[in-house]
Image: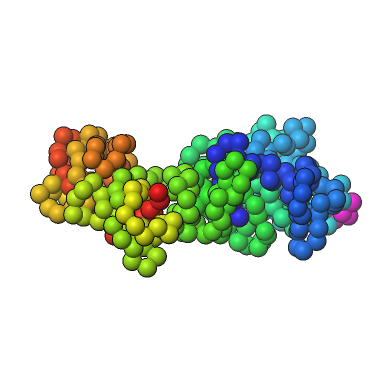
């Protein structure tokens, strides 16, 4: 379960409430059906991994990992067994005698994760644990964490403001803003069926096209864009049936560039290419349908030569992959 949102929206506060570092003004906190409001942190069986890892610098790796077990007075033989098994799980066998300053950032992170896991927590809490890592290490650690979480089957609450992290790691995502959960759902639901304009604009790249409601087809709202014949269909609207102004939120991968002479939803002028290795991001100005530049994500490398900067082009919209809002 990932708590996703901008800085200051309440993600870490909510995590601290679950951990018991803060007390709720109202409501209940339940773990495995048991009310935790008045239960102190050390009795909640919470494993927490902090943003700065919070390792003891004077202790060895093994001692850091064993600390929670020692506090719980686990017998030494059992303690040593569990530390050994947990270090093997995070691939740190052979590092038992090193101190934190002798480890890389990724290795320190694994120690912090092992310390949180070794106590067999009822809930694992992760507060932006990858924020200090470089991109490649961050991606590899995401994969490792997901594998470990699946293997142990431990309930995990993960806090991040990184959308790609949330989408790749989560079974469920809670998108937060100003202390409230705006939408709760699977990554696919959050990305493809945002419930409001905030979620649509915050999660992933999106284009906002001006248009008018041109009718409804079941749960779909058909939006006329830029006065052209082409239309895009949205998966959500606010229930209106009459003609009114609306905004169609469309992902870059659901826009396609075509010749300006063809029938299309709108047209514009290409102003920039950004080569991204596996794809090309193409930016366009479409004054008649959007006040911002549109972003089209093309998987073909030849797009840069086929559609050079300055070209006047048409834009097609996948007919049922948008989200419409007033």
Position in image of residue 18 (x %, y %): 73, 49
Count of labels shown? 0
Q: Would you place residue 320 above or below residue 270 in this image?
A: below
75 in the magenta segment: yes
Q: Quadrant of residue 30?
A: bottom right
- Image quarter of residue 21: top right
The residue depicted at 62 percent of the width and 62 percent of the height is 151
Residue 144 in view here? no
Q: In this view of the protein, can residue 312 be seen by the observer?
A: yes
Furthest residue toward front = 242
The one nearer the camera, 245 or 151, is: 245
- The picture places residue 122, in percent across and down from the top left corner, at 75, 58
Q: Residue lying farthest left?
A: 261
Residue 184's x, y, as percent? Answer: 56, 56
Residue at (51%, 36%) from the top-left corner? 134
Q: Is 162 positioned to the left or the right of 155 in the image?
A: left
Tell whether 25 sits left or right of 178. right
Q: Quadrant of the N terminus?
A: bottom right
Instruction: Judge whether residue 147 is colored magenta.
Output: no
Which residue is painted at 34% across and 57% down in the image? Answer: 242
Main secondary structure found in the magenta portion = loop
Q: Is residue 199 above or below residue 319?
A: above
| Residue placed most toward the observer, 272 or 91 | 272
Residue 192 in the image: x percent, y percent? 42, 57
Residue range (magenta): 73-77
Identify the image's colour scheme: rainbow, by chain, secondary structure or one colour: rainbow
Judged from this view, the residue extending furthest toward the bottom is 218
Viewer-nearest residue: 151 or 222: 222
Q: Tell me what residue is drawn at x 33 percent, y 66 percent.
A: 217
Closer-to-camera residue (219/321): 219
């Amino acid at each position: 379960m990932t708590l996703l949102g901008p800085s200051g929206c309440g993600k870490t506060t909510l995590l601290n409430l679950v951990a018991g570092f803060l007390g709720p003004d109202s409501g209940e906190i339940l773990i495995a059906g048991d009310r935790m409001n008045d239960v102190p942190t050390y009795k909640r069986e919470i494993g927490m991994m902090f943003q700065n890892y919070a390792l003891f610098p004077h202790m060895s790796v093994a001692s850091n990992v064993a600390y929670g077990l020692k506090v719980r007075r686990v017998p030494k033989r059992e303690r040593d067994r569990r530390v050994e098994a947990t270090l093997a799980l995070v691939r740190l066998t052979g590092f038992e005698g090193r101190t934190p300053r002798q480890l890389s950032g990724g290795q320190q992170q694994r120690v912090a994760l092992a310390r949180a896991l070794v106590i067999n927590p009822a809930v694992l809490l992760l507060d932006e644990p990858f924020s200090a890592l470089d991109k490649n290490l961050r991606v590899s650690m995401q994969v490792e964490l997901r594998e470990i979480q699946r293997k142990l089957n431990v309930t995990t609450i993960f806090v991040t403001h990184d959308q790609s992290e949330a989408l790749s790691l989560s079974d469920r995502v809670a998108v937060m803003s100003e202390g409230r959960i705006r939408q709760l759902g699977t990554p696919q639901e959050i990305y493809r069926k945002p419930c409001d304009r905030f979620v649509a604009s915050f999660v992933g790249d999106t284009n906002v096209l001006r248009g008018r409601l041109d009718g409804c087809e079941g749960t779909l709202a058909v939006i006329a864009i830029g006065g052209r014949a082409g239309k895009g269909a949205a998966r959500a609207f606010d229930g209106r049936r009459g003609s009114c102004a609306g905004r169609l939120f469309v992902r870059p991968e659901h826009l396609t560039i075509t010749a300006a002479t063809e029938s299309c939803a709108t047209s514009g002028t290409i102003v920039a290419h950004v080569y991204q290795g596996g794809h090309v991001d193409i930016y366009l100005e479409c004054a008649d349908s959007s006040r911002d530049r549109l972003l089209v994500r093309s998987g073909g490398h030849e797009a840069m030569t086929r559609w050079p900067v300055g070209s006047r082009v048409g834009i097609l919209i996948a007919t049922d992959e948008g989200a419409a809002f007033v």
